[in-house]
Amino acid sequence: MEGRILVKDRYFVPYIPYERLEKAIDAVAERINHDFKHFNGTPIILCVLNGSILFTGELMKRLTFPCEFSSIRLSSYEGTLSTGVTRKVLGLTSSIKGRTVIVVEDIVDTGKTITDLHALLLDAGAADVKICTMLLKPDVYKKDLKLDYVAMEIENRFIVGFGLDYDQLGRNYKDIYILDNSVEKTAMKHFLIFGPPGAGKGTQAAKIIDRFGLRHVSTGDLLRREIAAGTPLGLQAKTLIDKGELVPDSVVEGMIASELDNNPDAKGFIFDGFPRTTAQAEHLDAMLSARGEKINAVISLMIPDETVFERIRHRAEIENRVDDTKPEIIRNRIDTYHAKTEPVIAFYKGKGVYREIDGLGTIDEVFGKVSALLDEYLPA
Ligand code: 5GP
Ligand code: MG
């Protein structure tokens, strides 16, 4: 196994040698063989592309019962439909109607992909769906769906190799490597704080600034400041807002660029409320990349939709905003949130910087977890 490797622009260090993976795959294959030895029928082994290509190959050559092979590719997040299914199937290579399907995944993180896929397959008429994943991050997996076969559990860190990619690279390594957060080439470190309405983003951002000395960038605040100062950008924004139009991405991006330029001595920035779309995320990436910088981590405060619902309703009652107490309106806000942010989450997941934190608990409990995460990047 090689020592430290550079994949695109980030360093990774050895984590799971191939020999250990092989043993874990032996064990999981044995369990599947045992369960399917007397199975009446021919299950379909369904490889979820692209990540599980190597794992599926290794697994299949160990299976000793009659089975067929199929593959599927899912689109990236496309917004939430009423069913809660967020991904589109791009290619299912054979019919699964009435069949028993053994889904083979590379890694289960939050479980969103696998629960979506499970629902999709049952929808498509599968008689039974079993799940086999090479890796599981038990600290983040919060879904009720039972994972039938898990070859190995790992900590909540970003890995590459053995089919898993960082920005489409690194799949070809035979061993698994883990992102080395301690080696950073850039001076400024930027972070994003993410979460549904009511997750406590503002509260946590304030505590982060206090403790870690990052600059808080809220696009709403920036806009109000530019307008108040009567800068050319502010005037442009004001004209649009007065006409009831949305401020275009280019204006918001311009404000962020000048904020970066005007604070060369900052340790880094914490972005709040931006980017909201993948287009904005791509622009931000390009803008930072031109400066030799990047988003180091996306801190995602997760709370269940039901909690979001209660918090919005509670807030509306306190502030006497009748509209926001209507269930349909609140549901709609939550759906819009998911539809808009999930593609952004997928974007950052692909870059290996998405870090989810359980947002339930007291402010200090949540901040404890946020701080532990930031300590990895900004050691005292
Ligand atoms: P989930 O939907 O369970 O949150 O995420 C599952 C998908 O995210 C995986 O199929 C994989 O594409 C990606 N993913 C999650 N964690 C990692 C990781 O540590 N490394 C890589 N390369 N991809 C990951
Ligand atoms: Mg995958």
Image (spheres, rainbow, N blue to C red):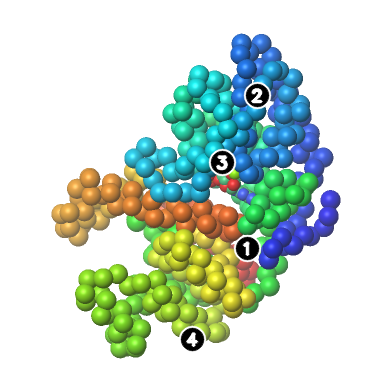
The answer to whether residue 119 is left or right of residue 179 is left
Give residue 216's position: percent from left, percent from top.
Answer: 44, 73
Disc 1 to disc 3, C-alpha distance: 34 Å
Name which residue lies at 73% across and 45% down: 162
> How many residues crowd around disc 2 within 10 Å: few (fewer than 14), some, or many (20 or more)?
few
Which amino acid does the dot numbered 2 rest on?
Glu
Give residue 242's position: percent from left, percent from top.
Answer: 21, 76
The residue mark sitting in front, 1 or 3, is 3
Disc 4 to disc 2, C-alpha distance: 60 Å
Image mark for residue 376? 1
Q: Which residue does the numbered mark 2 point to in the structure image?
A: 68
N-term-proximal mark, 1 vs 2: 2
Disc 4 to disc 3, C-alpha distance: 44 Å
Image mark for residue 73? 3
Which amino acid does the dot numbered 4 rest on?
Asn
> How many residues crowd around disc 1 within 10 Å: few (fewer than 14), some, or many (20 or more)?
few
The residue mark sitting in front, 1 or 4, is 4
